[in-house]
Image (spheres, grey):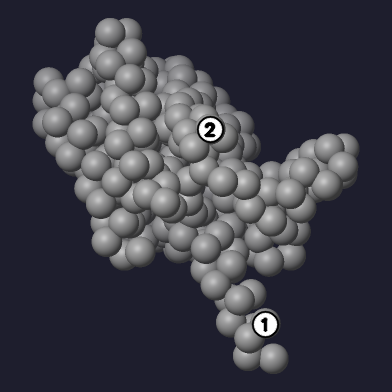
Amino acid sequence: MRLRITAAVAVGVLLIGLFAWPIAQPADPFDPVLFIAGNITRDGAFKLAGLAVLASLLAFFVSWPYGRHIAVLAVPSGLAVWAIRSGDMAELMRQNPAATERLDLFAQIKWEPFSWLAIIGLGFLAVHICTKFLSPKTASDLRARSVPAKAYFINFAVALGISVLLAKVLLLVLAQDIKVSDDTLGAVIVQVTTAQAVFAILVSFGAVAFVIKKFLDIGYTCPVIAAALVHPAVIGVYIKPEVMEYMVNRWPAVFYPNSIVAILPIQMVAFGTLGSIAGYWMAVRYDYWRKHES
């Protein structure tokens, strides 16, 4: 099983993370990887979408017969390489020194996560189609079909709200760097390093997926979607005109009113997906251990 997981991850890393890096590579190596920055063209986006499907299909077969469970790791693993190689938000803050420019920037970044979620979603869809036609039905599939659709969607909506809220709280605790007291905002925080952001996202969404699976019996799809909703939720609350004006006049570009807004959308979605999948399977393994232990 470990070899299958390694093979599926390797497919995504090689095909998307390394081979397709020129699609997203910024002209300036210090610039972040963003759709809104224009370094990913429309043609590049279509190529990335095709590679996401191809990587998922290859991962499905190299991890056979467990491709339905493992192949979903391919696309987020490839995007995770981009997220690590990317520049950070501080460079964008330096390039947009005026408060109005930063407000416009965050207004666009607010919806950027859904572009990355769409790429990962294409990979999930490819795996789902392969599973539907190639993988045998299991007892868990039959039980899932017996759950009323209305009850499932209500549980999913509740789980999604809890996922966003819990992820936000955990990220604020874990995504830390130098924090300085401020009389107006309470505190401001320095640009979170990539390593710290990766750690915070993996642990936060791993914990969220564990809780959602354990107490609501919802899969990792819910926290994966929540990874794309964190930025809109946080930016809508913390990024206000008066706050941006105050930050521009009072603090250097590397300081932020909130640590989450210092994290790139590709980092949040890619590592949030990986953390969610890991947390889900940890919950499954924990339930299995408790059952046999008792």
Residue at the limit of the structure toward the bottom, as seen here: 294
Q: Is residue 198 left or right of residue 13?
A: right
Residue at the limit of the structure toward the top, as seen here: 43
Q: Tag count in the figure?
A: 2
Where residue 241 is drawn, which disc sits there?
Answer: none
Q: Which residue is mark 1?
A: 291
Q: Is residue 87 left or right of residue 235?
A: left
Query: Badge 2, how many Cα within 10 Å: few under 14, some, many 20+?
Result: few
Q: Quadrant of residue 222?
A: top right
Residue at image point 63% right, 90% down = 293
> On screen, 2 above or below 105?
below
Judge by depth and name the residue closer to the eye, 245 or 57: 57
Residue at image point 24% right, 33% down = 16
Whether residue 285 is visible, yes or no, is yes
Q: Position of residue 97 (x, y in %)?
A: 31, 25
Quadrant of the frame with the C terminus = bottom right
Judge by depth and name the residue closer to the eye, 111 or 173: 111
Q: Is residue 146 left or right of residue 171?
A: right
Q: Which residue is mark 2?
A: 133
Q: Secondary structure at mark 2?
A: helix
Query: Could you give the CA–CA distance between mark 2 and mark 1, rounded to whole angstroms?
Result: 32 Å
Q: Position of residue 20 (x, y in %)?
A: 19, 27
Q: Is residue 219 left or right of residue 257?
A: right
Judge by depth and name the residue closer to the eye, 11 or 192: 11
Q: Earlier in the sequence, mark 2 or mark 1?
A: 2
Residue at image point 58% right, 82% down = 289
Q: Position of residue 95 (x, y in %)?
A: 25, 24
Q: Quadrant of residue 145?
A: top right
Q: Amino acid at mark 1?
A: Lys
Q: Secondary structure at mark 1?
A: helix
Q: Amino acid at mark 2?
A: Phe
Residue at image point 56% right, 46% down = 136
